[in-house]
Image (cartoon, helix red, strand yellow):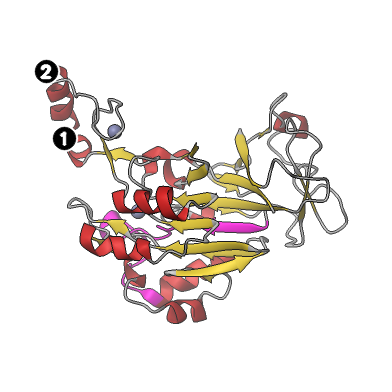
Amino acid sequence: MEHITRIGHVDGATATSKVIRIVHISDTHLAHNSLTPPRPLSGNISIRRSNSVETPNAVVDESGKDAFFNRSTSIESREDEFHKGGVFLSSALRKSRVNNYEVPCGNVLVHSGDFDWSRQSGGLLRSDNFEEIVQVMNDFFDRFPHKVKIFVAGNHEVSLEGKKLLTVQERLTSAVYLYNSSFTYEGINFYGAPYTPFRYMTNARGFIRRAGKIAPHWRDIPTRTDVLVTHSPPYGILDLGTKWTTRKLPKLTRALHSVLPETDCDACGATHPGLDHWGCPHLKEEVLIRIKPKLHLFGHVHECNGVTTRKGITFSNAAFVNAKRPHIFDYYL
Ligand SMILES: [Zn+2]
Ligand SMILES: [Zn+2]
């Protein structure tokens, strides 16, 4: 079941309002071949508004036919795709074959980083091979019918660190590479930046910055950004990741917790034994107080795939490797 989140001018929407569908994925970590394009392979889709909030907006192709629901699948019947009474679609990321997942139709496909695995993490590609990884990425995006495809690097993109925007963009012809830069589509301002805060226990060190060095990058984000794409979550929002000690020494950690139960977290007030906030406090401040985008897309923390809203901003962590779930947003212009 996949939820479609409506954002933008939803309240004042009329029958003629334009809706742009944004599909968000992240952290595919070389599992990109298990992500398959939606059919039909036409980029000329449009989103037709449904009359009620109870039913999802329809995706129609050039001929006006429903592009998203009327296709036959080998797995399940169309009827099963609707969650009764809600705007849920059944596995928008449908498990069509073993380990194959279909990415939903949309106008824009955003990947918020960690396409690669660093070599130390057992990656198939050598992370120091820039030409090879960009070629694989280009082939990946080329398979998808979305009008616009946007890529922002993550800390596993070690091979992209230090490469100029143009150097990458020249090779990545099938996607827009956002590297401290923006892109406007249908009046929607996208901005992308790849940085994540420094952590001791990681061997993927692309675009990792210590606190003093990371804040200026967030200050560079234009205030008029509608859709912000970063690899890092903001601190305290969909950013609970497994502590290094929990991962490496699970038995010892469990034993410790049984004697010394963890207290409430100072940051969020919840108790989350074995988990830590991996997000960036400086990013949180900029996003919540100054930028206030409609949508903030990120990944990085595999354990925290989800969508949440805070202060009118919709936040999306679409890390793929664990949850195998993309997020869909209907942006009302
Ligand atoms: Zn907490
Ligand atoms: Zn990451």
Local crowd at mark 1 within 10 Å, few (<14), some, or many (≥20)?
few
Distance between mark 1 and mark 2 Cα atoms: 16 Å
Residue found at the very far front of the displayed protein: 290
| Image point (77%, 62%), residue name | 44
Is label 2 in a helix, a strand or a loop?
Answer: helix
Q: Is residue 229 left or right of residue 98?
A: left
| Image point (30%, 48%), residue name | 281
Quarter holding the C terminus is bottom right
Q: Which residue is mark 2?
A: 259
Q: Which residues are magenta?
A: 107-130
Q: Amino acid at mark 1?
A: Leu
Which residue occupies the foreground of this view, 117 or 181? Answer: 181
For residue 231, above or below residue 325: below
Residue 80 at x, y = what percent?
Answer: 72, 29
Res. 206 visible in picture: no
Which residue occupies the foreground of this view, 291 or 36? Answer: 291
Res. 167 visible in picture: yes
Residue 113 lies within the magenta run:
yes
Question: Closer to the camera: disc 1 or disc 2?
Answer: 2
Q: Amino acid at mark 2?
A: Val
